[in-house]
Image (cartoon, helix red, strand yellow):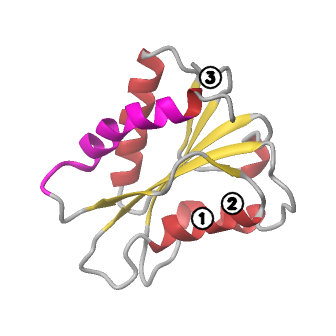
Amino acid sequence: MTDKNIHIIVGSQMGSSEYVADQLNDVLQNKGYICQVHEQPDLIQIPSSNVIWLVCTSTHGAGDFPDNLQEFIKNLNQHTNLNSLSYSVIGLGDTSYDNYNKAAKDVDLLLKTKQANQITQVLEIDAMDENLPEDIAIAWLPTWLTAISEDKL
């Protein structure tokens, strides 16, 4: 188990990402992890050093970040170096749209350019899948927990 706090950063327009984040938070806390969900993320209030970010976001409109994530991303662009931050991204999207999971891919790329440490590849959840998004994320969680418990973090 990691000794780092987990901050779940939510980007949600319609509520699906919030629900997935809340479900993950419940499972993680039941396993003894210290987590905090940020439904209205404010970069000033979220530590970015020696913590883990789990960004859970949908894509809005023509590949845009959800409204509640816009200011967070703008402020994140101001950072030059986040090399003491570890992160993963979960994207909720719909493959029937041209910009499938673009916000998730964009935040992943942004964090990489800021030298943050990617724990796992972006988990892309498709709304067209017959399984519920939260069930897909919870099924993925053991793999993620194994990755964060490795010494590289």
Which residue is depicted at the point 85% across and 57% down?
A: 81
Is residue 9 magenta-colored? no
CA gap between label 3 and label 2 equals: 21 Å
Q: Which mark is residue 58?
A: none
Residue 87 x/y as whole percent: 62, 46
List the residue tagged with mark 3.
2
| Residue identifier under label 1 | 107
Where residue 18 sits: x, y (%)?
41, 47
The quadrant in which the N terminus is found is top right
**Left or right: 35 with respect to 13?**
right
Report the front residue among 140 and 28: 140
Q: Is residue 66 visible?
A: no
Residues marked 1 and 2 touching at CB (< 8 Å): yes
Task: Tell me whether circle 1 and circle 3 mark residues in contact (CB < 8 Å).
Answer: no
Q: Quadrant of the C terminus?
A: top right
Residues rendered magenta in the picture: 130-147
Viewer-nearest of labels 1 and 3? 3
The residue under label 2 is which amino acid type?
Leu
Horizontal and vertical percent position of residue 58: 42, 63
Residue shown at the point (41%, 69%) measured from the top left:
101
**SS category of the residue bearing label 2:** helix
Q: Which residue reaches farthest front?
A: 151
Q: Which residue is mark 2?
A: 111
Q: What secondary structure is marked by label 3? A: loop
In the displayed structure image, the side of residue 27 where residue 38 appears, left or right: right
- Contact between marks 3 and 2 (CB within 8 A): the answer is no
Which of disc 2 and disc 3 is earlier in sequence? 3
Q: CA distance from mark 1 to mark 2?
A: 6 Å
